[in-house]
Amino acid sequence: MDEFPFRNWRTAPDRVPKFFVVPRPPAAKLSAMPHYIAFLRGMNLGNRRITMDRLRGHFEELRFAEVTTFIASGNVIFSSKSADPRKLTEQIQQHLAKSLGYGVDTFLRTRSEVAAVAAFKPFAAADLAHPAHTIYVGFLAAALSPAQARGLVACRTEIDDFCVEGREYYWLCRTRSNESKVWASPALRALKLPSSSMRNVTTVRKLAALYKPA
């Protein structure tokens, strides 16, 4: 997000008044900073409505650089001088809660981590390639306990399957997601899984392709 604010200026480039020129940070300095993708939970669902321009503004208020968003489900790409994802996550959550009036669980990943998630193959090739099947990725703040991971995988049905890898879980749905009953099942509810933010794997793959590791 570093658009020239006078892009409709029709004067020839060599005649543009100097006061219209907006200084930009050197590209080398921006590219050298750590890059992150924030997956925000529950954005633009129910009463939680926010424009992407406003969401970008909240991240810019935290002095992050190269801030942009991808679709309206709460995916924010940015760079920061900080190399501490946990500290950044706390800053983002506190700032959004103060600015929006409600908590927004935030799950931060580096571009390399998103690329690894996009490349991971959690299910059989036939399931991955089936046009009627959809795969979702759940981003967690920390890895599930071994008992929770085993319990989630054990909740598989003829329609649903699960895989757990690191700080993500993968849900294979062989029908429309709103037709699956697995998330309301007593067994899955009993696991008391921690908060997560889920994305269609297609979205994750597009993010990985657009924002490759620096």
Image (tube, grey):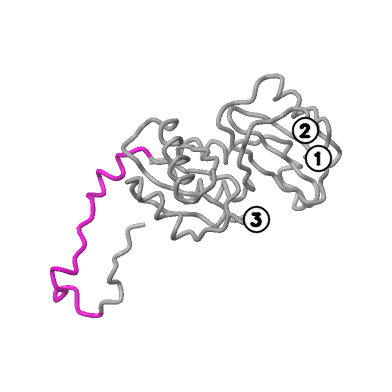
Q: From the top left corner, tell me how far across and down residue 173 is, in percent.
A: 76, 44
Q: Which residue is drawn at 52% across and 40% down?
A: 106
Q: Which residue lies furthest to the bottom in this view?
A: 10
Mark 3 and mark 1: Cα distance apart in space: 19 Å
Q: What's the amino acid at mark 1?
A: Ala
Q: Which residue is drawn at 64% across and 48% down?
A: 200
Dot 3 or dot 1: first in sequence order is 3
Q: In terms of secondary structure, where does tag 1 sit?
A: helix
Q: What's the amino acid at mark 2?
A: Arg
Q: In which quadrant is the C terminus drawn?
A: top left
Crowd class of label 1 (few under 14; some 14 to 19; many from 20; radius 10 Å): few
Task: Relative to 199, say whether 151 is above or below.
Answer: above
Dot 1 or dot 2: first in sequence order is 1
Number of marks: 3
Q: From the top left corner, tell me how far across and down residue 148 is, in percent.
A: 71, 24
Q: Name the residue under label 3.
A: 46
Dot 2 or dot 3: first in sequence order is 3
* Residue 17 falls within the magenta-colored stretch: yes
Q: Name the residue under label 1.
A: 184
Q: Which residue is drawn at 41% across and 51% down?
A: 58
Pick the residue in front: 203 or 53: 53
Q: Nearer the viewer, mark 3 or mark 1?
A: 3
Q: In terms of secondary structure, where does tag 2 sit?
A: helix
Mark 1 and mark 2: Cα distance apart in space: 7 Å
